[in-house]
Image: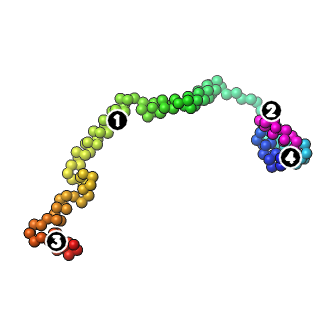
Amino acid sequence: MNCKQCQEHILTDYLDGQAIPRLKQEIDGHLASCSQCKEFLTQVEKMIVEPFKNAPRIMPSEEIWENIRRKISDEKRLENGEWIERFNNVFFPRPVIALALVILLMVMTLKLNALSGKDNFVRNGADLLGNDYMAYLFADDDGSGEYGTSIEQYFL
């Protein structure tokens, strides 16, 4: 183990007592032979650990613990497949409300369609130029066999 790895493990697992036995043994072996890392450990303990050794323990109230337990149990239920139930409760709280919203949407759509009437530029979804205008362009009113105006005839 090199010094950089040793110092990383000191900051993360070693001081907390969370290092696995094999890793703790490697760190102890490195500390026995490396004065620089031993000094690093001493400084870290002095700056990070010592100020908290005599600090009073503050215990959260029972209400906070109960909230934590409830959130953990909610997460476990969601992991076990109850997420579908929660999804349905959030997005579909009452079938009557959902039905009312669908009916309201249909009525509004029909009302808007009725209000627009024949003045729509686009009537059947594909009539972009208007049937009346196209009929005018291709009408042969004078019987000459020509379509449109003289300018249109020039370009056709």
Separation of marks 4 and 1 at Cα, in angstroms: 69 Å
Q: Residues within 10 Å of mark 4 (few under 14, many from 20)?
A: many
Q: Residue at x 56, y 32 (%)?
A: 79
SS type, badge 3: loop
Q: Earlier in the sequence, mark 3 or mark 2?
A: 2
User: The disc labelled 3 sits on which kind of residue?
Assistant: Thr
Tell whether label 3 touches label 4 (CB within 8 Å).
no
Q: Residues within 10 Å of mark 1 (few under 14, many from 20)?
A: few
User: The disc labelled 2 sits on which kind of residue?
Assistant: Asn
User: The disc labelled 1 sits on which kind of residue?
Assistant: Leu
Residue beneath label 1, please? 101
Separation of marks 1 and 3 at Cα, in angstroms: 53 Å
* Mark 3 or 2, closer to the camera: 3
Separation of marks 1 and 2 at Cα, in angstroms: 62 Å
Separation of marks 4 and 2 at Cα, in angstroms: 26 Å
Vertical side of 76 occupied by 117: above or below = below
* Mark 1 or 3, closer to the camera: 3
Residue beneath label 2, please? 54
Residue 59 placement: quadrant:
top right
Residue 74 in the magenta stretch? The answer is: no
Q: Residue at x 42, y 30 (%)?
A: 93
Tell whether label 2 touches label 4 (CB within 8 Å).
no
